[in-house]
Image (tube, rainbow, N blue to C red):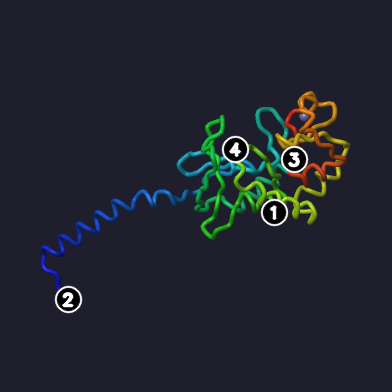
Amino acid sequence: MMMCPTKVRWFLNLVTLLLVLATPFFARAETFTVAHVCDGDTIILSNQQHVRYIGINAPEIAHDMKPSEYFGHEARECNKRLVLGKRIRLEFDRERQDRHGRTLAYVYLENGTFVNAKLIKEGCAHVLYVPPNVKHYDRLLTLQRKAIEGQKGMWPNVIATDIGPYRGNAKSKKFHRPTCPFGQQTSPKNVLHFNTKKEAFMNGHSPCRRCLP
Ligand SMILES: [Zn+2]
């Protein structure tokens, strides 16, 4: 069926209008390319945006005169293999940025792989509880428990170096050496006792950055 020129023009105008209206919806599902992998939990996108993965923490690699932590390089390699040069999609939680101006996000590959979860599954990072950004905390902790039991990645060595007991804080979900002043400030109603590091990690607690248990 042939359309008369007026109808064609009307039809093209309608298509243009629909495309303009739909643009914000496409923009929401925007994908980015990963240009650089800093470490096991931080990347730089091709638009120079720094992205810090939510809900996980990978061992550090040497920076600002601080030496690398155990498994830091392996964790970066793990992250590189997953995302470097790939198109990714970002999912956000309650806060979009951290205090360093980095974007906070859950990262997904085009094939649907949930990168934050994959790094936990491989034992290349541990879960990190930072409210209010805790949307996937339970799911990540379930994967961490499996990774610990399955002796994945860093776990055999991390839980072997044990000089417990440790003091946990049920509110912050951090664990400390008994002598740590931060740990000693824990309100009595929030104090937990862990005999081993394994117990602390199985309960979703992460090591205090000051006393480094
Ligand atoms: Zn501490």
Q: Secondary structure at mark 3?
A: loop
Question: Which residue is found at the position 72% from the left and 50% from the top?
Answer: 144
| Quarter the N terminus occupies | bottom left
- Residue 210: % across, % down: 75, 28
| Most distant residue in the bottom direction | 1
- Residue 40: % across, % down: 65, 44
- Which of labels 1 and 4 is toward the front? 4
First of labels 3, 1 by sequence position: 1
Query: Do callouts 4 and 3 mark residues in contact (Cβ within 8 Å)?
Result: no
Query: Do callouts 2 and 1 mark residues in contact (Cβ within 8 Å)?
Result: no
First of labels 4, 3 by sequence position: 4
Residue 121, which numbered label?
1
Residue 1, which numbered label?
2
Residue picked out by circle 3: 205
- Which of labels 2 and 4 is toward the front? 4
- Residue 158: % across, % down: 80, 44
First of labels 1, 4 by sequence position: 1
Q: Secondary structure at mark 1?
A: helix
First of labels 2, 4 by sequence position: 2
Marks 2 and 1, how far apart at CA: 57 Å
Crowd around label 1: few <14 · some 14–19 · many ≥20 (10 Å): many
Q: Amino acid at mark 3?
A: His
Marks 2 and 4, how far apart at CA: 58 Å
Q: Amino acid at mark 1?
A: Lys
Q: Amino acid at mark 2?
A: Met
- Which of labels 4 and 3 is toward the front? 4
Residue picked out by circle 4: 132
Query: 148 left or right of 78?
Result: right
